[in-house]
Image (spheres, rainbow, N blue to C red):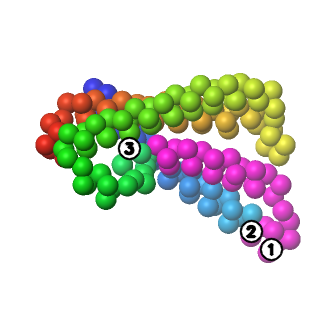
Amino acid sequence: MIEKASYRINQWIEYMLFGLGFTMTLIVAVQVFFRYVLNHSLFWSEELARFLLVWLTFLGASSAYYRKVNPGVDFLYAKLSPLLRKLSSICTHLASMALFIVMIIYGYQFAWFVRLQISPALQIPKWIILSIIPISGVILMIHAVTFLFAELKADPHDH
């Protein structure tokens, strides 16, 4: 069940990543056109592009983690015995989960801390932008729990 939830969440995120990336590209292209062709600056475009980039970064990290394309030290991992590989993988997932807990707790606290601040150009409450930190922490945690359960169920010789 958690595997299916993890899969569906990642599918939804990948659609969001496309939409956010496409939107950011359009905003930057329109801003360049306005600034250099029409000699008029869109005061809000840079701030919106920056906020979209923040969301793209955190959601992109969760998708990369789900797809297991995050950086690793594979040449050492490949030299380990099957049992040590399994233990190494479990420790990696547990360490990742500890980081995701930090993201959830401190991301929430930071978003709460800035809850009354408003962005200068868009007049958006900053907690909305920064809420992606604990949100992505929860998403990453779901993926990590999925991977940990799969690792615990797997036969060490399947690696």
For the point 80% across and 40% down, the residue is 119
The answer, for residue 139, to whether it is visible in the render is no
Image quarter (top left, top right, bottom left or bottom right) of the N terminus: top left
As drawn, 64 above or below 137: below
- Residue 50 covered by magenta stretch: yes
Asked whether residue 41 is in view, the answer is yes
In this view of the protein, which residue sits in the foreground, 8 or 68? 68
Q: Position of residue 158 (x, y in %)?
A: 15, 44
Q: Residues within 10 Å of mark 3 (few under 14, many from 20)?
A: many
**Residue 10 is drawn in which quadrant?**
top left
CB under 8 Å between discs 2 and 3 = no
Mark found first going from the N terminus, 2 or 3: 2
Q: CA distance from mark 2 to mark 1?
A: 6 Å
Separation (CA) of disc 2 from disc 3: 35 Å
Position of residue 99 measured from the top left corner of the image (x, y, whole percent): 51, 34
The local crowd at label 1, few if under 14, some if 14 to 19, many if 20 or more residues have their Cα within 10 Å, is few
Q: Compared with residue 104, is residue 124 higher up or lower down, i.e. above or below?
A: below
Q: Which of these two is toward me, 7 or 87?
A: 87
Q: Which residue is mark 2?
A: 32
In the structure shown, which secondary structural element does the residue marked by tag 1 occupy? helix
Q: Is residue 152 magenta?
A: no
Mark 3 or mark 1: name the one nearer the start of the chain: 1
Disc 2 and disc 1 in contact, CB within 8 angstroms: yes
Tell me: 134 left or right of 27. left
> Looking at numbered disc 1 in the image, what kind of residue is underneath it?
Tyr
Judged left or right of residue 36, residue 156 is left
- Residue at 52% of width from left, 28% of height from top? 101
First to last magenta residue range: 33-62
Which residue has dot 1 on it? Answer: 36
Name the front one of labels 2 and 3.
3
